[in-house]
Image (spheres, grey):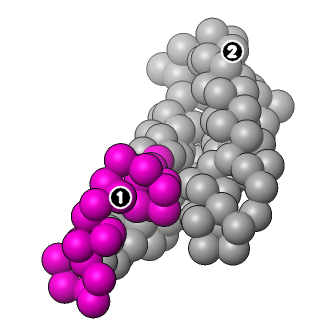
Amino acid sequence: MSARYGKTNILIGLWVMAFFMLYGFVLIYLRDFAPGKEEWIAQYASGPHFQSRLAHVHGNLFALLNIVFGLVLLKLDIPATQAKWASWLALGGLLMPLGILSEVYLGLPPFLVILGAASILLATITLAIGISRAGDGG
């Protein structure tokens, strides 16, 4: 059962990682080639520039965490309940970087950021509980 969830986390993690890698190229363009790049560089530690870099870093980190969670779910005999919850909560963690982008580009409040941060934390705790209850697996 946990293998199904593991594959989902790996697949979505890889796609999200590819998206945020491409977004990194957008950030390079804005810093080095875009008209008004001087203004963008001047806001290095604040405003949309800083938030965009946060989204890029957290997007790749949380995508990588989903890949790791997926591999753990594939390899260990974690009880179905913990596997299901850890998988879905880890995927929910991806709302954090998407929430940061929604703040920058759509002006939305940080609800998705908070929800995603809480979700990845709960996913980690749930996976730890699942691993503690896992069988030997051979």
- Looking at the rendered image, the disc whose residue lies closer to the viewer, 2 or 1, is 1
Let me know if residue 76 is in the magenta part: no
Measured as percent of width and height from the top left, residue 81 is found at 82, 31
Q: Is residue 48 magenta?
A: yes
State the image coordinates of residue 99 (x, y, percent, origin top left).
66, 57
Residue nearest the observer in this picture, 109 or 83: 109
Which comes before the other along the chain, label 2 or label 1?
Answer: 1
Looking at the image, residue 23 lies above or below residue 48: below
Which residue position is annotated with label 2? 129
Question: Viewer-proximal residue, 70 or 42?
Answer: 42
**Can residue 60 be seen by looking at this rendering?**
no
Region rendered in magenta: 31-59
Query: Element type at marker 1?
Result: loop
Residue at x 39%, y 72% (from the top left corner): 23
Q: Quadrant of residue 97?
A: bottom right
At label 1, the amino acid type is Gln
Q: Residue furthest bottom?
A: 35
Which residue was labeled with disc 1? 43
Q: Quadrant of the N terminus?
A: top right
Give the tally of numbered discs: 2
Residue in the picture at 77% in, 55% down: 109
Neighbour tally class for label 1: few under 14, some 14-19, many 20 plus, Cα within 10 Å: few
Looking at the rendered structure, the kind of residue marked 2 is Ile
The outermost residue toward the top is: 132
Q: Is residue 21 visible?
A: yes
The percent position of residue 12, horizontal first and vertical second, equals 56, 63
* Residue in the picture at 50% in, 34% down: 72
